[in-house]
Image (cartoon, rainbow, N blue to C red):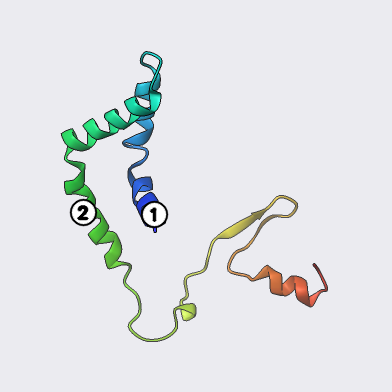
Amino acid sequence: MLSFVYDVADLYKTEVSIPAAFRAASQAEGDLEGRVRRHCRDFFLNSRMLERIVPDLATLLRGADLPEEGDLDESDDQPGHLWDPEGGAIAGGVNYEELDEQVGGD
């Protein structure tokens, strides 16, 4: 349930939470958590952040322009590459578990 809230918070983390944490840490010792909360509260209030969050969410929830018919797997868009520390870049969009089972891997 809260995962959506955390996802939304991540959209603004670099703009709000991180600066608030550094600002609070640079101040006097004691009650760091409370100072961070107050800095965030002040930013939300002064910047009228909720007026921005609601339209941002509406834009995000409208979603991408998806095809009206057909299977999304038929898309010509190819996924990016994955990084294998032993082999470098490998193709994305491949179920490697199935390949392992075919060659007798674990």
Judge the density around disc 2: few (<14), some (14-19), many (≥20) Cα neighbours within 10 Å: few
Give left or right: position of 81 versus 24.
Answer: right
Percent of width and height locating residue 13: 36, 40
Residue found at the far right of this picture: 104
The amino acid sitting under disc 2 is: Val
Give left or right: position of 17 versus 81.
Answer: left
At mark 1, the secondary structure is: helix
Reading the image, the residue beneath label 2 is 54
Judge the density around disc 1: few (<14), some (14-19), many (≥20) Cα neighbours within 10 Å: few
Residue at 44 percent across and 78 percent down: it is 72
Q: Earlier in the sequence, mark 1 or mark 2?
A: 1
Q: CA distance from mark 1 to mark 2?
A: 17 Å
Residue at 28 percent across and 33 percent down: it is 40
Reading the image, the residue beneath label 1 is 2
- Above or below, comparing residue 46 to residue 97 in the picture: above
Percent of width and height locating residue 61: 29, 64
Residue found at the far top of this picture: 28
Percent of width and height locating residue 37: 32, 32
Give left or right: position of 70 versus 100.
Answer: left
At mark 2, the secondary structure is: helix
- Camera-nearest label, 1 or 2: 1
The amino acid sitting under disc 1 is: Leu
The residue lying toward the viewer, choosing from 51 and 73, is 51
Residue at 34 percent across and 75 percent down: it is 66
